Image (cartoon, rainbow, N blue to C red):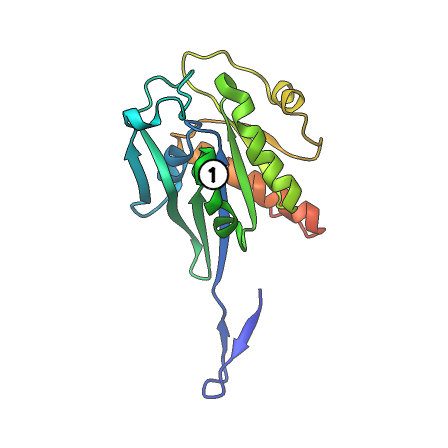
Amino acid sequence: MDYVRSERDPSPARLPLALKILIAGGFGAGKTTLVSALSEVRPLQTEEVLTDAGIGTDDLSGVEGKSTTTVAMDFGRITITDDLQVYLFGTPGQDRFWFLWDELAFGALGAVVLADTRRLPDCFPSIDYFEQRGIPFVVGVNCFEDTRRFGAEAVRQALDIEPEVPVVLCDARDRQSGKLVLISLVEHVARQRGEPVPVG
């Protein structure tokens, strides 16, 4: 970590570090739920109620019980140490809000692409976006109740992603499960940069 010295204070002062991670994926994959589960503060959410205006635009196949949608972003924060904080930005899942993605992705360490096996093709646009821009990502397979479970390798093959991209089974509602996904992302970024992989 870098340090800076003040001319008035000869002791080294730590330069706080903030990491930005995107939480992406298809409509209804659990992005808002994951940010809420991980954030140590009350998350900022831009959820709006789905209305009849979305009929024919919002595909609710497989997520018929969903009644709200993110229209800008979700935001949460995790404090690792006094010098290190992680900021989580949940992206909107629908095509008509993708104009926000470039702003949200600017300066990001990497991304978590949440996959819902009931609607697996929905995460293809997120994967394409990060691949085209060289942004490291991992796939978190959100294991919804009462749905058929698939192993990580089966999902990898279905998504046709590179072998080095981690695929992690998770429960977006569970804080510890979400942390394991973030750890997987940080380790993946470290490997890509040729840096030591954090332990513990």
> Could you say where residue 30 lies in the image, as x and y percent from the top left?
41, 30
| Quarter of the view holding residue 64 | top left
How many marks do you count on the picture? Answer: 1
> Could you say where residue 196 lies in the image, as x and y percent from the top left?
67, 51
Identified at 43% across, 19% down, the residue is 144
**Front in this rendered view, residue 138 or 60:** 60
Identified at 31% across, 48% down, the residue is 41
State which quarter of the image contains the N terminus. Answer: bottom right
Does residue 15 sit above or below 68 in this rendering? below
Identified at 60% across, 41% down, the residue is 130
What residue type is disc 1 on? Answer: Lys
Does residue 187 sit above or below 50 in this rendering? below
Identified at 60% across, 22% down, the residue is 152
Does residue 13 sit above or below 170 in this rendering? below
Q: Secondary structure at mark 1?
A: helix
Q: Would you call the spot at circle 1 few (<14 residues within 10 Å), some (14-19), or many (20 or more)? A: some
> Could you say where residue 141 lies in the image, as x and y percent from the top left?
52, 26
**Front in this rendered view, residue 194 or 146:** 146
* Residue 19 as seen in the image, left or right of residue 190: left
State which quarter of the image contains the C terminus. Answer: top right
Q: Which residue is mark 1?
A: 179
